[in-house]
Image (tube, rainbow, N blue to C red):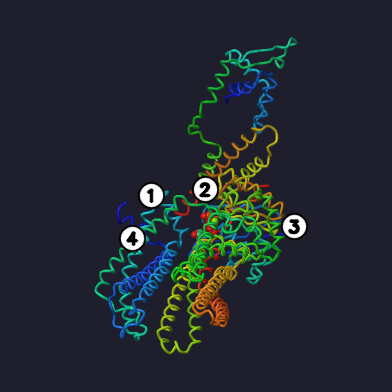
Amino acid sequence: MTVTTLITLARPKSSTDRRRSTLLVAAVAVAGVFLLVGQRIVRVGSLDSATYSSYLTEDGLRPGVVTAAVLLAAAACALAFQALRLGTAARDRRLAALRLAGATPSQVRLIGAADAGTSGLLGGVLAGPLYFAVAAVVQSLPQVGRVLPSPAVGDLAAWPVLAVVLALVAAGAGGLLRRQLSTEPKSEPDRAAWQGRYLTIGAVGAALVALSLMPLSPILIFVQAAGVLLAASGFAPVAVAAYARRLERSGDPVRMLAGGRLLHTSRSIGRMLALLVVCGGVVGAVLAIGRDRQLSERELAASGDFIYTGLGFVALLSLFAAFAAGVAMLAGAADDLLDQRSQLAALNVFGMGASQVLRSVRIQLTGPAAVAVGAGVLIGGGLVCSLQNRVDPPADTSSVVVFVLIAAAVVGVLAGGVAALASGVLSGQVRDAVDPANLRTT
Amino acid sequence: MATAELVLGLLSAGPAHGYDVKRGHDSWFPDSRPLAFGQVYTTLGRLERDELVEVVDRASEGGPERTVYALTAKGRERLARWLAEPIEPAPGGVDEMVRKVVATIRTGEDASAYLARQRAIYLHRIRELKSAEAGGDSSSWLVRDYVALHLDADLRWLDRALDRITEQKETNR
Amino acid sequence: MTDALEIQRVEYAYSRDVALRGVSLGVDAGEIVAVTGPSGCGKSTLVHCAAGILRPQAGTVTLAGRNLAELTEAERTRVRRTQVGIVLQFGQLVPDLSLKDNVALPLLLEGHHAAAARRAALGWLERVGVAEDSEALPSELSGGQNQRAAVARALVTGPAVVFADEPTGSLDSRAGEQMMELLVASARDGGAALVIVTHDNLIAAYADREVRLRDGVVQHEVRLS
Ligand SMILES: Nc1ncnc2c1ncn2[C@@H]1O[C@H](COP(=O)(O)OP(=O)(O)OP(=O)(O)O)[C@@H](O)[C@H]1O
Ligand SMILES: [Mg+2]
């Protein structure tokens, strides 16, 4: 296969294909920006504490900022991965047609890799200018908000390296995703098997969190965060599947449709929900710390700016991650609508119109998002409370506990509301899906 | 018509009277013309002359219908050879329907009215063949399927022919 | 005899093509009508107009005694849900739901009790011969089995007319004929008229009447029974 053939075959074909690759490029670019930020901070020497935020100038805090950058890059990567998986059904059919036309499995993988790799490279290239723009913006902030040093010459060298690395990683992921094409599983391979695996992962995470809560535990805060992430990634898909089964049994057609879809996407939805749990956790922790700080005027006077900037940044960043997860979930739902359009058009004949399908999509997104964020707030806030309790046993944290409970409910409901509003974005896709013209498609 | 070989086939299950041979034939081909007695006996006579069948029992009061015939080894071999040979495609023979359609077009008659009549009668016949449930002998559906599929082939040819004629008319106009 | 379906001088044009140029057709209760004709002659469009899925630009469609043009969208949906069953070439079952839930869906949409709807669905799955797969997903079964479930879904509401657009198009000829026998028997069983679109003469031969379209008009109409 010549290079031109490869590029022709790998290039996005339909408008949905193009939308998918735009999302992929954007996600990779954002991930690239955060990685450039991370490497810049790692390589920074000593800084003038009058110019920059103390998060950068104090050696003890710097690794925290780097970790935050890496976590955000990871969130963007999760979005990129999700974008890569979009349109799989339609694309698989096209690639299966290529297989029939005589392409070998490795050629099909190569096409998948070329497709993803091009987007990865483009994202990596865009990351450079974006990074410099972000850095310029940060420089214009007041000292307390300057968490990023001004760009260095080294960044110019790191940028192309990063672009190549991102392209290679994307190509690898793209090729890997195509591998399943040759041994395509007919449906859920084995429901019990994956749930067992996920429950184990969740249990390990929960154990880490529990260990960190023991008195005098040597486990650090990052391990605790990792524990929460593991527990959420393990338990969320299983919980989604259980919720989906309940919806399916309900006997209300709209809920059944939502349940069926959730059940068969519980793992990818679960991954996004895990991200939401972590974001909720950060918000919960921030809220609990903030609430607690308000109690002691003394500390506030001493370092209020410092603390609130930190909390603000963290909250903003977790919002970004939540946004990424939300976009991924919406994109997945849009993809499903496109993929099932002929079935949905047939349902329309039986009286399940656009409004009901949209309601079903809303059910799929709203409940899980609300619960995930609420649970996250609860977990984050709870962990902070327990920590405070340990640091200062006689202090009365009951008011903070009540506050966390209320915050969890409020933020959860808020998240659900945002999800419900956001699913309205799909009303156009829903209307296209139930169009009788789709009765002619396979 | 390979009546001789068919008779050999009818005897392959075991010795039989001429009457059994006729009955067997008619149950194998319930929708075809029945085999005449005369034809059965002349065929059996010829087969006996060629040593393809032999008389194994002849009732004393005589009468050809009391005679029991059986396959010889040579007869069995002949039957096997016949069954093994594929049929040659019919060499350019033209069916009644083709003649009619050509004549319809050449004389300027309404071809689509002819199509409607022909479809009605053929589809009706296919319908009859389908609704004749698998009663009687187990092989009769084979024959019915054969007839139905040939009627289908005729109809498809007719469709195509008239489609092309209509197209030609439209382009000529 | 009351007509199950009465189509009068129906015209339908898509943005680029005129698909129907004044088609009239009546279908008696319990009758089986085959709609045949070359590709693109308007068969699917006719069925979609007759089933109340498309609104014809001219002419009238009367389904089970209701003139569809005089109904609101909601009323039309209700007529469609209760009086129309539809079977398409690929079954078009919801891939995430079991066969049983797929068949129960029209009843559930109609507001039936979940348990009763599922019982009725199972009954129909039994009649079409896939009851043992009632918990399976469409993707776990063959095209023929899916198609059988689609027949059950079309008949579960007890419609006046079942429309089948190339229901045997994706099956081999033997499976196609079995499918057709099932459709005919099921329609009889449920007391529904059957309008079947097909390219296949052997399938059309099951009908009581053949209506042949060409370029959006009825070319001929012949009685087969
Ligand atoms: N959604 C559409 N938009 C525009 N034109 C259409 C659309 N659907 C069908 N047509 C056109 O309308 C005409 C009739 O189409 P229709 O699908 O009804 O034919 P058909 O007889 O069902 O064909 P087939 O046997 O191939 O299914 C065709 O010329 C077709 O190109
Ligand atoms: Mg069609």
Q: Do the residues indicated by labels 3 and 1 lie within the same chain of the protein?
A: no
| Amino acid, disc 4 | Leu
The answer to whether the beta carbon of the residue marked 4 is less than 8 Å from any atom of ligand 1 is no
Q: Nearer the viewer, mark 3 or mark 2?
A: 3
The answer to whether C225 is drawn above or below residue A312 in the figure is above
The answer to whether C181 is drawn above or below residue C82 in the figure is above
Q: Which mark is residue A103?
A: 1
The chain ID associated with circle 3 is C
Residue A97 at x, y percent in the picture: 43, 52
Q: Nearer the viewer, residue C194 or A379?
A: A379
In this rendering, does residue C17 appear at all? no
Query: Which secondary structure, mark 3?
Result: loop
Residue A77 at x, y percent in the picture: 40, 66
Q: Which mark is residue C1?
A: 3
Q: Nearer the viewer, mark 1 or mark 2?
A: 1
In this rendering, does residue C183 appear at all? yes
Q: Earlier in the sequence, mark 1 or mark 4?
A: 1
Residue drawn where x is 33% and y is 60% of the image: A168
